[in-house]
Image: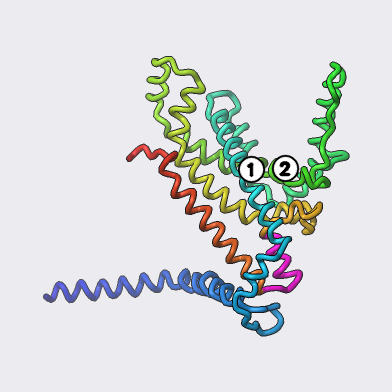
Amino acid sequence: MKRLKKASRIERINMRNGLLFTLPALLGLVGFTLYPMAASLYYSFCRYTGLKPPVWIGIGNYEFMLHDRLLREALWNTVYYTVFAVPLGIITAFALAVLLNAKVRGLAFFRTIFYLPSIVPVVASSVLWLWILNPENGLVNAIIEGFGKILAAVGLPQINGPGWLADPHWSKPALILMSVWGVGAWVVIYLAGLQDVPHELYEAASLDGATSWQKTRHVTIPFMSPYIFFTAVMGVIGSLQYFTQAWVMTRGTGGPVNSTMMFSMYLFQNAFQFFKMGYACAMAWLLFVLIMVATLLIFKTSARYVYYGGR
């Protein structure tokens, strides 16, 4: 009985010390996460400019969303970007990781080269891509036009580079093309995963006469599926919140003709340019619901294509 009382006292001391150690994190969670979320939810039901006290209007902000044409365009642009940018980024990163996993000379140099863009500040890389995609003197159009001259020399129709960010039909593909620039972090993740693929399986496949593509399809991809699943989830979440690159490259206008107006950009404009803080809060909660639904759908369907070796 005495030993039990002594143990209880130690447990209380451990509990107190544990709470003291976690108190800063708990205060941060309440002050910088839970309270702002609760305030945002309340303001989403109010007419609130941030300068005057909020006025309760019920679901007025949510009703206004149904008639907001620019909101629908921003939502379409964001979904368009997510549907194309995430798969393209995964395929590019996976292909680069497979190539960089080969035993060739200068491998460390190539790995560094492909990883470097992912640590460049987003604003700096956006300014760089403004020049790369410049329709008059940009690098991409110079390469396309050089290739077009070769086609013209052999009698084929000459091709010219598009207007990219100056053309509403090419502005979103321009942002998607730019997204490939930052796949270095995913390449590192895939490279780590490729180290865990059992070599015995490749040897067994070789004995069965499997080609390189068959080894990749039936051995590499199934073992890499948890890594691909992880990057797909993170990619979708990040793409639905896409903001900085589009804001910098269009100078915050979302042009041309709102073709690059992303959901987060329109949310930012409503909050800090139009001072419709209540409406911006309602948009933030809509974005939260969209991200939750997209993430749950990916998790629900993951059992069909994600393979865990230990199960």
Name the kind of residue labelled 2 in the image. Pro
Say which mark, if any, is on residue 84: 1
The N terminus is located in which quarter?
Answer: bottom left
Q: Is residue 284 above or below residue 262?
A: below
- Is residue 150 among what the camera can see? no
Along the viewing direction, whichever of 293 and 166 lies nearer the viewer: 293
The residue sitting at 42% across, 40% down in the picture is 304
Q: Is residue 140 above or below residue 66?
A: above
User: Callout 1: few (<14), some (14-19), or many (20+) C-alpha neighbours within 10 Å?
Assistant: some
**Residue at screen point 74% across, 43% down:** 174
* Residue at the (55%, 57%) spot, across then down: 291
In the image, 9: left or right of 279?
A: left
- Give the x, y percent position of residue 176: 69, 43
Q: Secondary structure at mark 2?
A: helix
Query: Dot 2, how many residues are within 10 Å of its Cα: few (below 14), some (14-19), or many (20+)?
Result: some
Q: Which residue is mark 2?
A: 173
Is 266 one of the magenta-colored residues? Answer: yes
Viewer-closest of 247 and 123: 247
* Residue 20 magenta: no
Identify the magenta region. Answer: 264-277
The residue closer to the viewer here, 311 or 202, is 311
Q: Quadrant of the C terminus?
A: top left
